[in-house]
């Protein structure tokens, strides 16, 4: 079996393979549990709504075993350098947008996301990034709201400008 | 040869200057809206439906066709330049086209996408007019078994074509299947894996997932690699034009794509995404 899975020489630390395997196994277990729990009348030839989750879950657990196997076979290589601060900024921006989209509206939330991403990519001046993000988000909101009649979540700024 | 007569009659109608203007308008609008990530051709047509209210049937049909093709093509532009496919069919365009853009060959990538769509579109329309009755017969024979076989073929192609290891390919395939299970089961109406969240009842949309995978994933990857402000924008170098070598490499691929895409498009539910993944597998 190992012949089919050539060990990646660039970076395949043991830990990563095991973490992936754990995640896959959890997902597979969740699917099987849900497949068993939901009401299943059996359907045609015993294939009901629970069959597909159980099957996919089973294969996911097999794949988790496969990842454990590759993790054992491969040797741990040094991690490539990763810029965790940058990833943190982007995640912060995404979370901010996720939670502020409804209360503050599309424009402000997207401007914050833009500023955080700019900071992550190495642009240090937060105020300028915020201003550019606000302007861009305004234009995007205007295009969606005015031209396409698609409703993006509106906050007080949008009400003030576009429906004032 | 009745079909050819009708085709020519249709062409004569379409040659009307006003109708050609509608076509131009439709393509331009469609491309502009299709360029927005997350808005595919179908949504483009739906959004711009009001524009065609005042037109007669021929005019609005022509404009719809223009909108659809424009939307399709707009999707390939964002895929190539931003690595953000607008709909599931241009995922393949993003995979290869963005690599070309990074290598400074964005111009030829855009050109081959445009000319390829044009050539394949012309050929497919001609073929459709000529052999549509036969294709319909074939498509109607398709039963559950044949659909199943087609799906398996598409999945196998996907897992074989993507990445260097079969384990990775299969893993992503089955994670995708697990995500696809979320929502209401199409056959029994049973809710699966929604955990009481109403937003999950409709399932997870391909567009949402594609933007998450390609745009957010790309942003995180790029950010994790930078040490300072040393990112550079890849300009579209060279004219948006193809060299002789580009042409000689491209035309066979266009024809193969047409040959694969045409029968699949004739099958109900055989979408552009399956066709594009299948033809990517042959390249």
Image (cartoon, coloured by chain):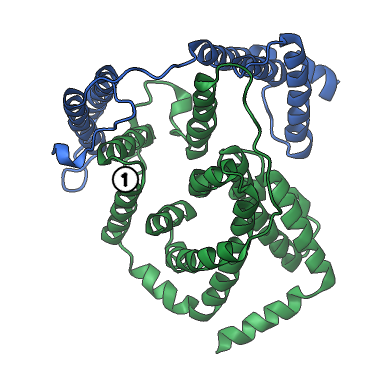
Q: Quadrant of the C terminus of chain A?
A: top right
Residue visible at 33% across and 26% down?
Answer: A11
Q: Would you place residue B26 above or below residue A94 in this image?
A: below
Judging by colour alone, the chain drawn in green in this rendered image is B
Residue visible at 45% across and 33% down?
Answer: B204
Is residue A37 toward the left or the right of residue A112 in the image? left
**How many numbered markers are drawn?**
1
Q: Quadrant of the N terminus of chain A?
A: top left
The picture quadrant where one finds residue A70 is top left
Q: Which residue is mark 1?
A: B159
Residue visible at 18% across and 32% down?
Answer: A62
Q: Chain of mark 1?
A: B
Residue farthest to the left? A1
Task: Pinpoint residue A5: horizontal percent, then vertical percent.
Answer: 22, 38
Foreground residue among B111 and B39: B111
Task: Pinpoint residue A20: horizontal percent, then vertical percent.
Answer: 29, 23
Chain A: colour as depicted: blue
Foreground residue among B30 and A64: A64
Task: Pinpoint residue B242: horizontal percent, then vertical percent.
Answer: 64, 60
């Amino acid at each position: 079996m190992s012949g089919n899975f050539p060990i990646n020489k660039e970076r395949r630390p043991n830990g990563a393979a095991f973490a992936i395997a754990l995640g896959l196994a959890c997902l597979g277990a969740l699917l099987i549990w849900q497949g068993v729990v939901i009401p299943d009348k059996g359907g045609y030839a015993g294939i009901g709504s629970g069959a597909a989750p159980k099957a996919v879950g089973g294969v996911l657990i097999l794949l988790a075993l496969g990842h454990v196997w590759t993790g054992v076979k491969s040797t741990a290589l040094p991690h490539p350098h990763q810029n965790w601060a940058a990833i943190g900024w982007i995640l912060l921006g995404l979370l901010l947008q996720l939670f502020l989209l409804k209360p503050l509206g599309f424009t402000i939330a997207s401007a914050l996301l833009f500023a955080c991403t700019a900071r992550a990519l190495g642009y240090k001046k937060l105020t300028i990034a915020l201003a550019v993000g606000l302007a861009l988000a305004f234009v995007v909101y205007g295009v969606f709201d005015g031209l396409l009649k698609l409703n993006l979540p509106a906050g007080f700024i949008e009400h003030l400008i576009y429906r004032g | 040869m009745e079909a050819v007569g009708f085709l020519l009659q249709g062409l004569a109608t379409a040659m009307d200057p006003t109708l050609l203007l509608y076509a131009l308008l439709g393509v331009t609008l469609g491309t502009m809206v299709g360029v927005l990530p997350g808005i595919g051709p179908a949504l483009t047509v739906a959004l711009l439906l009001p524009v065609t209210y005042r037109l007669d049937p021929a005019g609005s049909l022509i404009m719809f066709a223009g909108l659809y093709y424009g939307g399709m093509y707009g999707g390939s532009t964002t895929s190539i330049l931003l690595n953000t496919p607008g709909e599931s069919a241009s995922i393949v365009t993003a995979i290869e086209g963005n690599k070309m853009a990074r290598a400074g060959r964005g111009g030829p990538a855009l050109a081959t996408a445009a000319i390829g769509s044009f050539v394949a579109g012309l050929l497919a329309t001609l073929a459709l007019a000529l052999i549509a009755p036969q294709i319909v017969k074939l498509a109607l024979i398709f039963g559950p078994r044949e659909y199943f076989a087609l799906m398996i073929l598409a999945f196998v192609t996907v897992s074989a074509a993507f990445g260097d290891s079969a384990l990775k390919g299969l893993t992503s395939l089955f994670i995708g299947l697990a995500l696809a299970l979320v929502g209401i089961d199409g056959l029994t109406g049973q809710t699966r894996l929604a955990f009481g969240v109403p937003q999950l009842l409709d399932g997870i949309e391909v567009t949402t997932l594609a933007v998450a995978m390609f745009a957010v994933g790309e942003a995180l990857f790029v950010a994790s690699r930078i040490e300072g402000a040393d990112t550079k924008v890849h300009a579209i170098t060279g004219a948006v034009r193809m060299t002789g070598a580009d042409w000689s490499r491209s035309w066979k691929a266009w024809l193969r794509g047409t040959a694969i895409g045409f029968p699949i498009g004739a099958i109900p539910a055989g979408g552009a995404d399956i066709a594009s993944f299948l033809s990517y597998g042959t390249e």
